[in-house]
Every structure is written in C-alpha cells, then in structure tokens.
Amino acid sequence: MKTNQFHTDYWFLKNQTILGKRLKHLRSKHRVTQEELAFRARITVSYLAKIEKGQTNTTVRYLAKISRALEVPLYRLFE
C-alpha cells in the first residue's frame, strides 16, 4: 500500500510541475506579468507563483479563472 501511495504522490507532483510550466509559458507568450495575471484572475500573486512552480495542488475553479484572464480556453493549460 505504501508503494502505491508513493507512485500516486509522484504522479501528482510531476503533473503539477508540468501544468505550472505550461501556465508560465502561456503567461510569457501573452507578455503578462505574474502581478497582472493574478490581478486579472483575482488571485494572489503568491498563489499564482506556487502554481507555476508546481508547489501547490490547485482546483479547476482557479485554473478556469486563470484561463479566462489569459483569454485562452481551459484545455490549453493541459496541452
């Protein structure tokens, strides 16, 4: 059981990091600062930074706010 939990935790950490890198790439591509994106998405800069670094588990609700602020469809965060 413990080994299975390790693999599950590893999978989530890996995908959090991938999502964060993708988000940072899209933000940079749109030439938007973390501060500006956080303001548009109505989230804190520190929370956005943690998402981009893969340091937090976020929700679809927050990802939807971010995608709207970037004016991209939500699925683009996962491509």
Image: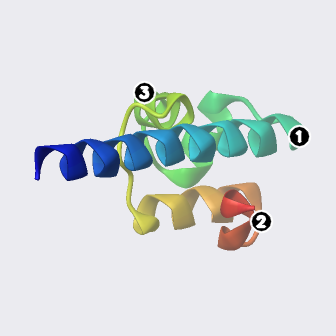
Q: Amino acid at mark 3?
A: Ser
Please tell me whether mark 3 sits on a helix, a strand or a loop: helix
Horizontal side, residue 75 vs residue 63: left or right: right
Residue 38 occupies quadrant: top right
Q: Is residue 34 above or below residue 58?
A: above
Residue 2 locus on image (x, y percent): 12, 45
Mark nearer the N terminus (2 vs 1): 1
Which class describes the residues within 10 Å of circle 1: few (<14), some (14-19), or many (20+)? few
Which class describes the residues within 10 Å of circle 3: few (<14), some (14-19), or many (20+)? few
Please tell me whether mark 1 sits on a helix, a strand or a loop: helix
Residue under label 2: 72
The CA distance from mark 2 to mark 1 is 12 Å
Residue under label 1: 29
Residue under label 3: 46
Residue 55 locus on image (x, y percent): 40, 31
Q: Amino acid at mark 1?
A: Lys
Figure quadrant of the C terminus: bottom right
Q: Amino acid at mark 2?
A: Val
Horizontal side, residue 48 vs residue 40: left or right: left
| Residue in the foreground of this view, choosing between 44 and 53 | 53
The CA distance from mark 1 to mark 3 is 20 Å
